[in-house]
């Protein structure tokens, strides 16, 4: 049951296991992106006293969770996933109403199932314990493993109400599986999703006997209090997914006090189309590019924002096919008026820097709408003004870089900054193998995930997945927001136990491994069985 609002219709916050009236410094309403109209519910922007109360409760919960076995954490995550599945229709309806993301296939067939699977993968990681990477030097009696950091703050993005949600997403799941309480701040674009999910999380906590402050929810805090929060010495770590301006500001605030913060801020995700690939299947690749840039109105952090190709006969044929397909897309609904204004500003900035509009380039009629947009520059123009032309336009827009030769294409790639992903399309004949090797070498220094013959949008929730990259796409560059158990290590620290007796060691570091532990001791060190 959704918690009741107070007499002013302001929604409650979840602090220390109790839904209570907020101490609000301001309020906001969610927007229906299809109409631009404000929705009825009033959501609070909590004052610092709410944040402080949640931190006090989180610190106490962290001390309790440090003694909780992974099996119990796994049971919570599994029960929580079960409860969310039972609420799937309502969750999807709320998410659609507050984001305009399509019910089918996006929310019901892709994102929510991925979210439930992610929670279950986190449960598996918590139960098996291999993420702790235990090492035992028995002759010296020195032992080390990874353990939870303490309270984790989760600050989610607008574009994934489930898979990256404050109380449902990968940061949340990884933090809990590593034994940390979560203080979640809902995104103002879909606060109703976080509220309903938190109701189910609290019920699952009660059913499995975890501390009530293991999951807490605030709906909003001021930007200054956000910086204060990530810098608070009671916070073990913060997981942030969102735009560059906020991510850089929060990173600076956390660093100033020595706090850990993991940020994913989006990127250009370069795509390189080699001549053989375009000669073999240019129209097919054009269709893939249009689908990648305009799927969910391009509101993916892995959307291709810059595309390199050579202006030969195959390249020109590809461009004609691409232009026709983009022109057929028409206006699309974005997540919010703010998202629309930011996309308009980004495209106007690109145009001012010399990019030419091939298709689109303007807002559509009605609220939050923008035309599918294709811009172009030459490699020479890009090299003359890279800072202004290598700008992320978050939404259904991308920039083509037309190159006269392969050498010009490789030079054009030099100013690229860190990205989450990058793709290279190669021919099947092997004629461009040398060129492909050159492109791959360029991309590897700039991306967290390298892809062949596929667009960068869409990523599997797999232990092998890497979703992070060099600055400014994310930081630190070795982390991954996706992929259990690796992603748990973002919210953990390594502790060494030097000379402790067996009874004082954590169970995972004793000479006899715990039941179900998939590690064994060989010559004094634990390795996978």
Image (cartoon, rainbow, N blue to C red):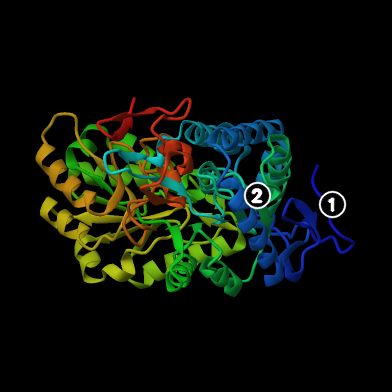
* One can see residue 354 in this view: no
Of residue 160 and residue 247, the one placed in the foreground of this image is 247
Q: Residue at x 13, y 51 (%)?
A: 406
Earlier sequence position, callout 1 versus callout 2 = 1
Where residue 226 appears, as percent x and y from the top left, is: 57, 68
SS type, badge 2: strand
Where residue 313 appears, as percent x and y from the top left, is: 18, 43
Q: Residue at x 59, y 54 (%)?
A: 335
Whether tag 1 and tag 2 are in contact, CB under 8 A, the answer is no
Q: Is residue 343 above or below residue 200?
A: below
Disc on res. 499: none
Estimate the spatial distance between the alpha carbons at disc 1 and disc 2, rounded to whole Å: 19 Å
Q: How many residues crowd around disc 1 within 10 Å: few (fewer than 14), some, or many (20 or more)?
A: few
Specify the quadrant that holds the C terminus.
top left
Of residue 301 and residue 34, the one placed in the foreground of this image is 301
Locate residue 392: give its quadrant: bottom left
Of residue 359 and residue 128, the one placed in the foreground of this image is 128
Number of numbered discs overlaid on the protein picture: 2
Where residue 262 appears, as percent x and y from the top left, is: 44, 57
Q: Which residue in the protein does label 2 denote? A: 215
Q: Which residue in the protein does label 1 denote? A: 4
């Amino acid at each position: 049951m959704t918690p009741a609002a107070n007499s002013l219709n302001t929604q409650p916050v979840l602090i220390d296991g109790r839904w209570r009236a907020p101490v609000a410094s301001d309020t906001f309403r969610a927007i229906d992106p299809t109409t631009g109209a404000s929705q009825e519910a009033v959501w609070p922007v909590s004052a610092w006293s709410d944040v402080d109360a949640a931190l006090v409760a989180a610190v106490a919960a962290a001390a309790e969770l440090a003694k909780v076995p992974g099996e119990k954490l796994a049971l919570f995550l599994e029960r929580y996933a079960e409860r969310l599945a039972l609420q799937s229709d309502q969750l999807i309806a709320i998410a659609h109403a507050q984001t305009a993301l399509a019910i089918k296939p996006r929310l019901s067939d892709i994102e929510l199932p991925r979210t439930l699977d992610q929670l279950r993968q986190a449960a598996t990681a918590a139960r098996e314990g291999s993420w702790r990477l235990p090492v035992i030097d028995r002759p010296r009696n020195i032992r080390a493993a990874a353990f939870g950091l303490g309270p984790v703050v989760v600050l989610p993005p607008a574009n994934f109400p489930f898979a990256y949600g404050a109380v449902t997403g990968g940061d949340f799941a990884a933090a809990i599986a590593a034994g940390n309480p979560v203080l979640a701040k809902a995104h103002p674009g879909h606060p109703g999703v976080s509220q309903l999910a938190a109701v189910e999380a609290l019920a699952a906590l009660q059913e499995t006997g975890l501390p009530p402050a293991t999951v807490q929810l605030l709906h909003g805090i001021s930007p200054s209090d956000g910086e204060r929060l990530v810098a608070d010495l009671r916070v073990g770590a913060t997981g942030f997914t969102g735009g560059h301006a906020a991510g850089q500001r929060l990173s600076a605030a956390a660093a100033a006090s020595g706090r850990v913060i993991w940020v994913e801020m989006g990127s250009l995700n370069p795509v390189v189309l080699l001549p053989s690939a375009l000669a073999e299947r240019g129209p097919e690749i054009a269709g893939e590019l249009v689908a990648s840039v305009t799927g969910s109105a391009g509101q993916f952090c892995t959307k291709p924002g810059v595309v390199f190709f050579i202006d030969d006969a195959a390249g020109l044929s590809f461009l004609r096919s691409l232009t026709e397909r983009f022109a057929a897309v028409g206006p699309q609904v974005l997540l919010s008026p703010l998202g629309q204004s930011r996309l308009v500003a980004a495209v106007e900035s690109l145009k001012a820097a010399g990019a030419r509009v091939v298709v689109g380039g303007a807002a559509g009629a009605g609220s939050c709408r923008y035309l599918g947009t294709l811009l172009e520059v030459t490699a020479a123009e890009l090299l003359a003004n890279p800072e202004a032309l290598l700008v992320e336009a978050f939404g259904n827009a991308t920039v083509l870089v037309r190159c006269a030769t392969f050498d010009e294409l490789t030079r054009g790639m030099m100013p690229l900054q860190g990205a989450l992903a990058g793709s290279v399309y190669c021919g099947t004949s092997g004629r461009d193998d040398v060129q492909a090797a050159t492109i791959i070498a360029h991309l590897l220094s700039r991306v967290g995930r390298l892809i062949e013959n596929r667009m960068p949008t869409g990523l599997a929730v797999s232990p092998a997945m890497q979703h992070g990259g060099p600055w400014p796409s994310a930081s630190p560059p070795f982390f991954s927001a996706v992929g259990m158990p690796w992603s748990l290590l973002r919210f953990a620290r390594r502790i060494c136990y030097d000379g402790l007796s067996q009874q004082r060691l954590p169970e995972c570091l004793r000479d006899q491994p715990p039941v179900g532990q998939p590690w064994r001791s060989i010559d004094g060190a634990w390795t996978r069985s």
